[in-house]
């Protein structure tokens, strides 16, 4: 394979800090483990808005399109709350997802045994937890038209539209079934079929696609029940497939089950197999610039990038194993430390992973 091209988009808040640690890992892989790659940095989100007036500059998109993979940290911050709606940092993120057609968002929620005590649930409920949420990422209410805020009868009315075509549901359902096939062969589709027409079509379509996957056991849950089940008995789930909005909400719940949202990576893939990799956490403006953020979700996003876009599962395994070793040795950032445990900073955690890689 020729030299892999990676675009790094640090973004806002803790983004640049966790990006720097991910880059240390990439450098170590390149220096010591035969990883043939080069990378450049681009602007997105508030940082891009400050520099260019746009949350997703054309130059960023152009480089993204010609890269083998994009590694994005986080966007957003209170500073931009008053920016015009179409210039807000989140629009940059949604814009790049849409522009690259990254419809399949894979969010694994895995509890590292070393962190069982960091979960807010009892250890027996979460030990060995390993769930994969397959979230549709370029449709639904996030992108549906019409949308807006209009004046009517002397007051303002805000409106958005949940919309899914059969084609969109079919392709994400396939991603879900294919993922389930490689795991325990169980897929749970989550919708709001009892209330929403879009969910009616969702369920019908998932069942139809399921006929091509006779070896996968398909079940369905309403999203409210699924939220409860995730905190009641999370190990009943293996692969979950769901819409953009429901996936956004459920993946935060699943993240907390594993101890910290600072631990979970994600992959967003398009039909050409191109991918963007990002931690599922946000920009955490409250702790930005303080060397407090946990860089492991970002480093584990590098592992997903290696596995899915660069087909280097050997290196991906190496990165995951290094993270496991660091956790096993007792090193903790503040978000995963128990009361009284010593805490290390963002940079120290990145350094420890690099040492463990060797
Ligand atoms: C996520 C985030 C984003 C989303 C925000 C930052 C737009 O919460 O990736 O889960 O809602 O998709
Ligand atoms: Mg979210």
Image (tube, rainbow, N blue to C red):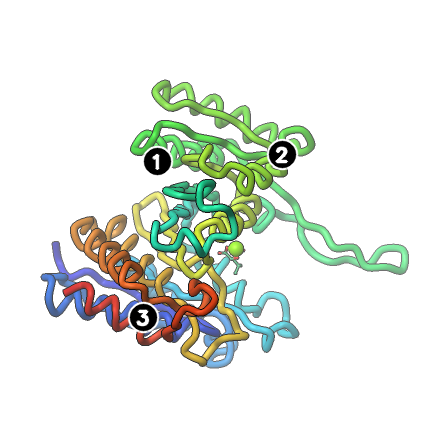
- C-alpha gap between disc 2 and disc 3: 41 Å
Which residue is rendered at x = 65% and y = 45% of the image?
161
- First-in-chain label (1 vs 3): 1
Q: For label 3, count other residues whose C-alpha is less than 10 Å away and answer few (under 14), some (14-19) or many (20+).
A: many
Q: Position of residue 237 (x, y in %)?
A: 45, 34
Tell me the residue that label 2 is attached to.
192
- First-in-chain label (2 vs 1): 1
Q: Position of residue 27 (x, y in %)?
A: 19, 70
Q: Nearer the viewer, mark 2 or mark 3?
A: 3
174 or 303, which is in the foreground? 303
Q: Position of residue 112 (x, y in %)?
A: 35, 51
The numbered disc on residue 179 is 1
**In the depicted structure, whether residue 326 falls above or below residue 241:** below
Which residue is rendered at x = 40% and y = 55% of the image?
264
Q: Position of residue 284 (x, y in %)?
A: 51, 69
Which residue is rendered at x = 31% and y = 46% of the image?
272
The answer to whether any part of residue 59 appears in the image is: no
Which quadrant: the C terminus?
bottom left
**In the depicted structure, whether residue 258 falls above or below residue 24:** above
Helix, strand or loop under label 3: helix
Tell me the residue that label 3 is attached to.
349
Helix, strand or loop under label 2: loop
Ligand 1 within 8 Å of disc 3? The answer is no
Which residue is rendered at x = 23% and y = 63% of the image?
5
Q: For label 2, count other residues whose C-alpha is less than 10 Å away and answer few (under 14), some (14-19) or many (20+).
A: some
114 or 205, which is in the foreground? 114
- C-alpha gap between disc 2 and disc 1: 23 Å
In the shown orientation, is residue 156 left or right of residue 66?
right
87 or 183, which is in the foreground? 183
């Amino acid at each position: 394979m020729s030299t892999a091209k990676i675009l790094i988009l640090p973004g806002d808040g803790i983004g640049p800090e966790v990006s720097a640690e991910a880059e240390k890992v990439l450098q170590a892989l390149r220096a010591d483990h035969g990883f043939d790659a080069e990378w450049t940095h681009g602007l997105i989100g508030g940082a891009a808005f400050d520099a260019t007036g746009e949350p997703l500059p054309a130059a960023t998109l152009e480089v993204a399109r010609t890269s083998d993979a994009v590694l994005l940290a986080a966007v957003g911050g209170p500073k931009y709350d008053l920016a015009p709606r179409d210039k807000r940092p989140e629009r940059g993120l949604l814009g790049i997802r849409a522009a690259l057609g990254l419809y399949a968002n894979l969010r694994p929620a895995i509890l590292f045994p070393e962190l069982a005590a960091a979960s807010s649930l009892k250890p027996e409920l979460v030990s060995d937890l390993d769930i994969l949420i397959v979230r549709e990422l370029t449709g639904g209410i996030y992108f549906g038209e019409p949308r807006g805020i209009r004046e009517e009868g002397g007051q303002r009315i805000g409106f958005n539209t949940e919309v899914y075509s059969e084609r969109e549901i079919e392709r994400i359902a396939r991603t879900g079934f294919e993922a389930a096939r490689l795991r325990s062969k169980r897929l749970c589709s989550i919708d709001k079929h009892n209330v929403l027409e879009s969910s009616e079509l969702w369920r019908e379509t998932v069942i139809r696609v399921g006929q091509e996957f006779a070896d996968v056991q398909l079940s369905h849950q309403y999203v409210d029940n699924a939220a409860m089940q995730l905190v009641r008995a999370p190990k009943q789930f293996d692969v979950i497939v769901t819409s953009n909005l429901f996936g956004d909400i459920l993946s935060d719940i699943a993240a907390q089950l594993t101890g910290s949202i600072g631990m979970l990576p994600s992959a967003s893939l398009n039909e050409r197999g191109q991918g963007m990799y990002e931690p599922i956490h946000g920009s955490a403006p409250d702790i930005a610039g303080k060397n407090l953020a946990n860089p492991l979700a970002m480093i584990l996003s590098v592992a997903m990038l290696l596995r899915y876009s660069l087909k280097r599962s050997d290196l991906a395994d190496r990165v995951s194993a290094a993270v496991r070793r660091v956790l096993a040795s007792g090193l903790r950032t503040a978000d995963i430390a128990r009361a009284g445990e010593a805490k290390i900073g963002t940079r120290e955690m990145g350094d420890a992973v690099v040492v463990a890689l060797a």
